[in-house]
Image (cartoon, rainbow, N blue to C red):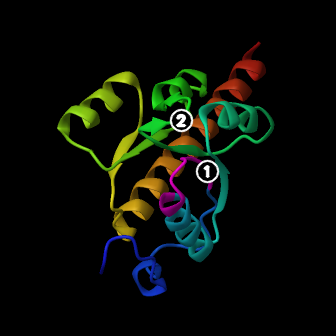
Amino acid sequence: MSPGKTPKKALSRFSHEEVVSALAVSSREEELAFLRGVFGVTGWTLYEALTTTDALILLKCRPVDLVISDRDLPDGCWRGLLDALKPTTPLIVTSRLADEYLWAEVLNEGGYDVLAQPFETEEVVRVISAASRRNQNASSQAKRTAIMMSAGA
């Protein structure tokens, strides 16, 4: 399978019943187009922002399961988004220069993962699916804890 392609056959093994919503933050049209293709085939919901500022405005009115951000943005970088996200919302950083240093930096700062460009379709879907499940599990656990605490009060 060629990097950057989103063939339906490559995505056929992933569940279409899974509900995922994400915000993609990038000024690179080719990155956004690739993600639109993946999200379109999987039936997931994708919102888009070109800058950190636009992303922060969008996140105030549209909660999402995860955020996918290019390493470098016109008005900042992925760290500006990470600081604004809820602790349970995973941040996936994308970069053409993805290496061990960036991966360690993202994880040490509290990000979820790094996706190297050009994208590999199955890897992108696997990482997004796992990040979404982690967020949904954390949200469910928080709700159960709140119910248990209010019942015991």
State the residue in front, 85 or 139.
85
- Please tell me the numbered disc located at residue 74: 2
Indicate the position of residue 101 as horizontal and vertical percent values.
Answer: 20, 32
Identify the element where label 2 is drawn.
loop
- Please tell me the numbered disc located at residue 62: none
Relative placement, left or right, of 145 versus 15 is: right
Q: Residue at x 40, y 81 (%)?
A: 10
- Against 1, is 77 above or below? above
The residue most toward the front is 74
Magenta segment, which residues?
21-31
- Residue 136 in magenta stretch: no
Which circle, 2 or 1, is nearer the viewer? Answer: 2
Residue type, mark 1 in image? Ala
- Against 58, is 96 above or below? below
Indicate the position of residue 16 as horizontal and vertical percent values.
Answer: 59, 74
The residue most toward the bottom is 9
Indicate the position of residue 41 as horizontal and vertical percent values.
Answer: 58, 76
Q: Residue at x 31, y 24 (%)?
A: 108
The residue most toward the right is 61
Quadrant assignment for the N terminus: bottom left
State the residue in front, 153 or 91.
91
For disc 1, the marked residue is 22
Distance between the Cα atoms at labels 2 and 1? 20 Å
Identify the element where label 1 is drawn.
strand
Q: Residue at x 77, y 12 (%)?
A: 153
Residue type, mark 2 in image? Pro
Q: Earlier in the sequence, mark 2 or mark 1?
A: 1
Label 1 CA crowd tier, 10 Å (few <14, some 14–19, many 20+): many
Asked if the residue at tag 1 contacts the one at tag 2, i.e. Cβ–Cβ closer than 8 Å, the answer is no
Q: Residue at x 59, y 28 (%)?
A: 85
State the residue in front, 17 or 122.
122
Label 2 CA crowd tier, 10 Å (few <14, some 14–19, many 20+): few
